[in-house]
Amino acid sequence: MPTTTSRQQDWGKLLRLGADRVQSDWRTKLMELRERVRKDPENPQLWMQVANHCRTHGRTRQMVQAYARALHLFAQSNRFDEALTVARIMATTSIEDVRRQAVGQVERRAGAEVTPLRKAV
């Protein structure tokens, strides 16, 4: 069984800390956006911000839901140019993001099976 050096363990700690910080920042920003949407749920621009934030961080289901809500609100207020833009974004990005997310999951699973990151006993 291969052993890990203290340098490798330090790198592992740093990577975990960095991932936790990024995850925390992402969740904090999402919670701020959700609070703004809760205060003004009929503002399609806020829904677009939520969708773009979710898209940036690979949250496909939430992204599609937010885009759908923005599309509905734009169409409801007769802002058809914006509604068409959102529909175009949804048509391209949701398929690409779903595919990218699925490929990423397969790669992570394959990588986890080949090179497990465990501490040496």
Image (cartoon, rainbow, N blue to C red):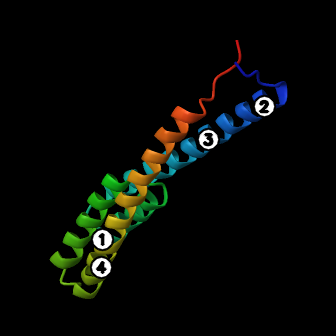
Which amino acid type is marked by label 3? Ala
- Location of residue 116 in the rendering, given as x and y in whole percent from the top left corner: 59, 29
Q: Position of residue 38 (x, y in %)?
A: 31, 53
In the foreground, 44 or 101: 101
The three-letter amino acid code for the residue at tag 4 is Arg
Residue, disc 1: 90
Whether residue 117 is situated above or below residue 48 in the rendered picture: above
Instruction: Let me know if residue 42 appears in the view.
Output: no
Q: Earlier in the sequence, mark 3 or mark 4?
A: 3
Q: Residue 19 got which mark?
A: 3
State the separation of the CA atoms marked 3 and 4. 32 Å
Please state if 101 lies on the left or on the right of 90 as rendered.
Answer: right
Q: Which residue is mark 2?
A: 8
Residue 87 vs residue 50, the one in the foreground:
87
Amino acid type, residue under disc 1 in the picture: Met
Residue at the image point whose x is 76% and y is 35% from the top: 11
Determine whether label 3 and label 4 are within 8 Å by CB: no
Quadrant into which the C terminus falls: top right
Q: CA distance from mark 2 to mark 1?
A: 42 Å
Which residue position holds label 4? Answer: 88
Is mark 4 in CB contact (under 8 Å) with mark 1? Answer: yes
Q: Earlier in the sequence, mark 2 or mark 1?
A: 2
**Helix, strand or loop for disc 3:** helix
Q: Earlier in the sequence, mark 1 or mark 3?
A: 3
Graded by Cα atoms within 10 Å as few (under 14), some (14 to 19) or many (20 or more), the crowding at tag 2 reads few
Label 2 sits on a secondary structure element that is helix
Q: How many marks?
A: 4
Residue 81 point in image, percent of width and height: 27, 88
